[in-house]
Amino acid sequence: MSVDNAIKIFTGNASPALAELVVKQLGLKLAKATVIKFSNQETSVTIGESVRDEDVYIIQSGCGEINDNLMELLIMINACKTASARRITAVIPCFPYARQDKKDKSRAPITARLTANMITVAGADHIITMDLHASQIQGFFNIPVDNLYCEPSTIQYIRTKIPDWTNAMIVSPDAGGAKRPTSIADHLNLDFALIHKERKKANEVSRMVLVGDVQGKIAILVDDIADTCGTLGLAAKTLLENGAEKVYAIVAHGVLSGKAIDVINNSVIEKMVITNTIPADDKLALCPKLDIIDISPTIAEAIRRTHNGESISYLFSHVPQ
């Protein structure tokens, strides 16, 4: 007698709130797993129910204590593999070490490739991730990778939450990441500008030059990662000095490390919009300018379609209802 394999969704300690939202969308419950740290800082994982011949999804974002969370993911994948799961999909909304994706100086490691190797060796059969910093990271894996996009949710947010958005201009805060903002500008039929930044060293911007005319426009800065927010703060100031009326910032992954919250609060940014690929509920109370786009419907629909063997390309241009 053949029985269809069921979906089992697990989560580690990186993004339990997002995992709860995803299972709620699917009408399921989170599968039982205990992930703890021993007193010697080793990670211990216990899978609390049978996964034999099941379709397993492990939701774990690369954020917070990144190394611990990555290790949790690897151990959970391996635990499910040795427990005879039929297929294991690692759902990584924010891919760890994504910015270390190339050899940009002598003796630099390509850590994103190393991370991909570790996930594959642990036993993952498939990866679902979101807005990779560089889409060629998909090529570091020799298993299928589905790179989802926040773009449809971003476009929906601009249309519904930003007043007078038709008088807006999409701005890229650096030339390297111009592809994402230009695509959004094309979809909304808006103009596009970019800011050229010169860095003295990593995480420190020395000078910014605006390419484009934002006079009398609402400027919407679009980027993939907001870490210390120094770039966004300086970019917003540059835009206002060049005649923009208001400045909004929309970012896929709100890392918001270091003094990021102070930088946002003291900046001229009207609203700082991030998604919940990285948990930020604790920062909402500290930063009244912060707003969060929920991307759990997109992840839930990707899981449903993957399980049923359907195409997920619909999600590249639509927000699931």
Image: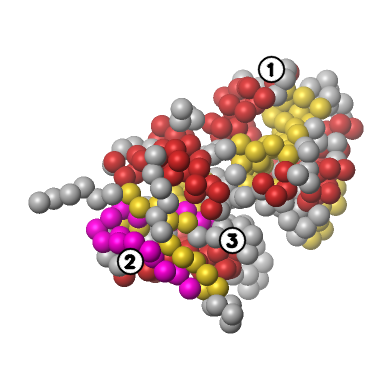
On the image, the x and y values in percent for residue 119 come to: 44, 64
Does residue 216 belong to the magenta stretch?
Answer: no
Find numbered disc 1 in the image and state the secondary structure of the residue it sits on: helix
Q: Residue at x 45, y 30 (%)?
A: 320
Disc 3 marks a residue whose amino acid type is Tyr
Q: Which residue is mark 1?
A: 166
Q: Which residue is mark 2?
A: 81
- The residue nearer to you, when weighing 60 against 221, is 60
On the image, the x and y values in percent for residue 163 come to: 72, 20
Q: Residue at x 77, y 58 (%)?
A: 258
Could you tell which of marks 3 and 2 lies nearer the N-terminus?
Answer: 2
Looking at this view, name the residue that lies furthest to the right: 241
What is the span of residues highlighted in magenta in the rendered image? 44-61
> Which one is in front in this view, the residue at disc 3 or the one at disc 2?
2
Q: Which residue is mark 3?
A: 97
Taking the image as drawn, is residue 299 in sight? no
Looking at this view, name the residue that lies furthest to the bottom: 40
- Using the rendered view, name the quadrant where residue 169 is placed: top right
On the image, the x and y values in percent for residue 51 come to: 30, 60
**In the picture shown, does residue 43 fall above or below 120?**
below
Q: Give the crowd class for mark 1: few <14, some 14-19, many >=20 residues within 10 Å.
A: some
Could you tell which of marks 1 and 3 lies nearer the N-terminus?
Answer: 3
- State how far apart marks 3 and 2 are (Cα): 24 Å
On the image, the x and y values in percent for residue 236 come to: 82, 37
Disc 2 marks a residue whose amino acid type is Lys
